[in-house]
């Protein structure tokens, strides 16, 4: 098996039974907020597009690049399709001219042309109704697991074919938190440091469970080439940047004794006869020296080259000015009526404001109304030109468009609200109906287990992750490392978001003593911006 790296989560897997092109991304994403890093526009597009199989993990635009797929990818390729509850990915690929599909069932091996393929599809509202997925490829000699930026809640299911030889996984941020929040700079720095540490710890935990022979850090970081966003690039390995580059994760894993390798666009890697994973990098502009010798200069040159594309993207937002209040009433209120559980989970009004107007999403009343000045717990400030564009185009997922672009600001009082971000991912009839159905199902907890003196439910109340694998405790607080959510063990109260209580019962003397100490008192109030759960 030979691995050809493209950028971000993009990789081409070469086997004796054909090639698999995964998540090729070349064009700017999220309103030209994100660009591939390092740049990959100099690769041989035609050679990459000549593939036997195509795997698009999900529809986020740093994984699904319709412009490139339409122009360069062979339409004879067989698409490996994750089992999502909504047909949006298949419809998008069919619209680009692809017609051959392997229909998978999540976690179930499929034999095709000498390959064994397993796709683990994630379908919870946090992943969005369009989902996320991981791909396992077994060519009879080696097994590769491409996690891209998915977070499987049962990673053991991905070991059913045997030990993993190569694992690609996310380590860098793919989120707007805490950068866009209206916070004192010191608070923002502290939260970013916490986020960065959690990202590395989560990736390391997956590596520990999966135990691959070699790890290839991937699925990040993007780079930010608009002058308005350039500050978010990590040019000096800053402790408060959530966008560290691949070298940092390679070093982190190697220090823990794990074989990990750096791959850049155009790099080729394979195991040699000694069992070492050997990587050959390109020369010239895509050499390690050219990319990393002076990272800021590299990015400034890249930004200058793509400035016309950024200007064209901004110009594309222009159009007829919307009448925001009636237009958003016509769009949002029918969705509110279809999503009572989501609305009740949000539980209060949310302010949407621009430089010249402000309105309220009154979720308890299922209404969009003029701003009456009342207190709110959540506020989003969006440039009017971009908000008009969102409304005019009926963009049905603001989380994976506007929010990831970082072209807005946010404020909140109190803890993160999972339902609110589900709402902003589900701005269509099909999506909100799917989210309602998901929340209506009360899945089994699969019993309890002992965690250092506490009897705790096995499944995370947030997204059903296996807490025997991802749960840690410090005597007072349980943390699920997949999304960083936390609970007060004595009360079961979620410290990260409203709702989502945890069953936890003290059984050891130490745990019982702690529970007795806090009995009858108010459980600890979460930090105003507790950090951790928002996005990737």
Image: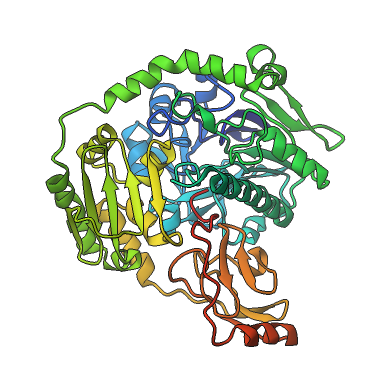
Horizontal and vertical percent for residue 115?
A: 61, 43
Q: Quadrant of the N terminus?
A: top right
In the figure, is residue 327 to the left or right of 440? left
Q: Residue at x 25, y 59 (%)?
A: 374
Front residue of 106/339: it is 339
Q: Left of 223 or right of it: where is 130?
A: left
Q: Nearer the viewer, residue 354 or 481?
A: 354
* Front in this rendered view, residue 495 or 174: 495
In-image side of 181 versus 43 (left or right): left
- Residue at the location (45% across, 42% down)? 180
Q: Is residue 166 above or below residue 527?
A: above
- Res. 397 in view: no
Q: Residue at x 70, y 69 (%)?
A: 474
The outermost residue toward the right is 274
- The colouring scheme, among rainbow, by chain, secondary structure or one colour, is rainbow
Q: How many marks on residues?
A: 0
Residue 157 percent location from the top left of the image: 62, 60
Viewed as shown, does residue 163 lie left or right of 96? right
Residue 523: image location, x then y, percent: 54, 77
Residue 273, visible in the rendered structure? yes
Quadrant of the rendered image containing residue 364: bottom left
* Residue 133, position as x, y percentages in the image: 51, 49
């Amino acid at each position: 098996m030979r691995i050809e790296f493209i950028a971000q989560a993009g990789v081409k897997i070469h086997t004796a039974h054909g090639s698999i092109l995964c998540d090729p991304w070349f064009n700017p994403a999220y309103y030209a907020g994100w660009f591939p890093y390092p740049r990959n526009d100099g690769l041989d597009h035609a050679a990459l597009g000549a593939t036997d199989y195509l795997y698009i993990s999900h529809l986020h635009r740093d994984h699904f690049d319709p412009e490139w797929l339409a122009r360069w990818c062979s339409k004879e390729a067989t698409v490996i399709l994750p089992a999502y509850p909504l047909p949006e990915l298949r419809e998008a690929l069919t619209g680009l001219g692809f017609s051959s599909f392997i229909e998978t069932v999540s976690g179930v091996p499929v034999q095709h042309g000498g390959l064994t393929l397993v796709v683990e599809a994630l379908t919870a509202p946090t992943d969005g109704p369009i989902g996320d997925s991981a791909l396992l490829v077994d060519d009879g000699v080696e097994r590769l697991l491409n996690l891209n930026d998915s977070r499987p809640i049962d990673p053991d299911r991905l070991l059913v074919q045997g030990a993993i030889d190569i694992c690609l996984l996310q380590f860098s941020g793919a989120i707007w938190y805490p950068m866009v929040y209206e916070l004192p700079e010191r608070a923002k720095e502290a939260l970013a440091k916490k986020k960065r540490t959690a990202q590395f710890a989560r990736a390391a935990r997956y590596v520990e469970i999966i135990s691959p022979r070699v790890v290839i850090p991937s699925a990040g970081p993007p780079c930010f080439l608009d002058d308005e966003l350039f500050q978010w690039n990590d040019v000096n390995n800053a402790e408060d940047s959530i966008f560290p580059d691949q070298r940092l994760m390679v070093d982190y894993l190697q220090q823990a004794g794990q074989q990990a390798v750096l791959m850049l666009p155009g790099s080729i890697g394979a195991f040699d006869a000694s069992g070492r994973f050997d990587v050959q990098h390109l020369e010239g502009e895509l050499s390690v020296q050219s990319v990393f010798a002076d990272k800021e200069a590299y990015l400034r040159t890249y930004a200058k080259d793509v400035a016309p594309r950024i200007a064209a993207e901004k110009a594309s937002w222009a159009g007829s000015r919307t009448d925001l209040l009636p237009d958003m009433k016509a769009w949002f209120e029918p969705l509110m009526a279809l999503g009572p559980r989501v609305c009740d989970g949000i539980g209060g009004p949310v302010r949407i404001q621009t430089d010249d107007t402000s309105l309220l999403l009154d979720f308890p009343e299922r209404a969009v109304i003029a701003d009456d000045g009342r207190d709110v717990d959540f506020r989003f400030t969006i440039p009017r030109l971009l908000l008009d564009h969102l409304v005019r185009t009926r963009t049905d997922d603001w989380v994976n468009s506007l929010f990831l672009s970082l072209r807005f600001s946010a404020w909140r009082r109190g803890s993160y609200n999972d339902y609110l971000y589900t709402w902003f991912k589900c701005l269509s009839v099909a999506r909100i109906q799917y989210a309602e159905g998901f929340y209506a199902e009360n899945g089994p907890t699969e019993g309890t287990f002992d965690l250092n003196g506490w009897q705790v439910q096995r499944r995370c109340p947030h997204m059903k992750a296996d807490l025997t694998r991802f749960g840690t405790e410090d005597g007072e607080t349980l943390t699920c490392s997949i999304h960083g959510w936390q609970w007060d063990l004595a009360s079961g109260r979620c410290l990260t978001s409203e709702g989502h209580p945890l069953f936890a019962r003290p059984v050891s003397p130490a745990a019982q003593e702690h529970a007795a100490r806090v009995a009858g008192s108010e459980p600890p109030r979460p930090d105003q911006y507790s950090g951790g759960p928002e996005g990737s």
